[in-house]
Image (cartoon, helix red, strand yellow):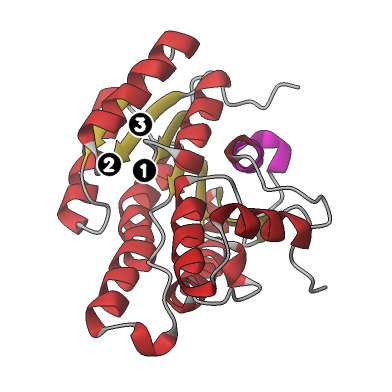
Amino acid sequence: MDLGLKNRVALVAASSQGIGLATAEAFAAEGCRVAMCARNSDRLHAAADKIRKEQGAEVFVDAFDVSDPAAVTRFVADVVTKFGSLDICVTNAGGPPPKGFLACTQEDWQRALELNFLSTVYFAREVIPHMQRRRWGRIITITSITTKQPVADLVLSNAVRTAVVGLVRSLANEFGKDGILANNVGPGFTATERLKELARARAASSGKTEQQLFDSWAADAPLKRLGDPREVAETIVWLASDRASYLTGQTVLVDGGLYKGL
């Protein structure tokens, strides 16, 4: 199936590992030119080299913290200078630490706000004018199932990521007339380093082993397994494609049926 993405420019944030990396790889496989960023320079460059070697794709990289608005502005400008356009923006960032409400400090809340909400604001603010000029664009945010179904001990994620959903709906409403679609993807329990971090924290306080926790999370989903980052990535690529041209303002859960609501 031709997704109509060949030669599109796709920016993927936090793409040195996990879902971000799988997403960058999936866009490259569709013939996109890819821009990648992450904080860890060595890991980021290694990921980009892997994509260039395996996909023969053009890849531009820059290492910085997505909570730095000046760095986001510079990166987007450099991407447009490098590739001449910017069609797709996938916002992403590492999740906040697993904590209960009373354990969260003022600094925890501020960091979660900057990293998991304001970073999306910064990217959207920079990419939308470029998309408006071409009257075509895709903004896709990566959040979590926590936007629909709060997860215990993830109060920072439960609260802050939900704000991203409100932003996505607002962007969809305001910029649909410009040919810009905005959607959110909410992964469930997916086999990433982030999930390992959560398992370590839960194991330390619950007396269960990390493997027992992985098994229990898998058992909660009707598919009885954890998600693979590639499954989330393929959903993101589909949302960016011409095959999803009448879908905007939505949250698509990639959770193996874990969400129990209607």
Q: Quadrant of residue 150?
A: bottom right
Helix, strand or loop status at disc 2: helix
Q: Main secondary structure of the magenta part?
A: helix
Which contiguous range is marked in magenta? 231-244
Task: Find residue 164 and report its horizontal and vertical position in percent.
Answer: 48, 68
Q: Quadrant of residue 5?
A: top right
46 or 114: nearer the viewer: 46
Residue 88 can be seen in this image: no
50 or 97: nearer the viewer: 97
Q: Examine the rendered structure and indicate whether residue 244 appears above or below residue 152.
A: above
Residue ID at (43%, 15%):
57
Q: In the image, 83: left or right of 235?
A: left
Q: Examine the rendered structure and indicate whether residue 41 appears above or below residue 92.
A: above
Q: Are marks 2 and 1 in contact (CB under 8 Å)?
A: yes
Which residue is the site of mark 1? Answer: 130
Residue ID at (38%, 67%):
97
Q: CA distance from mark 3 to mark 1?
A: 15 Å
Which residue is the site of mark 2? Answer: 76
Q: In the image, 165: left or right of 110?
A: right
Q: CA distance from mark 3 to mark 2?
A: 9 Å
Q: Residue furthest front?
A: 207
Disc 1 residue type (three-letter): His
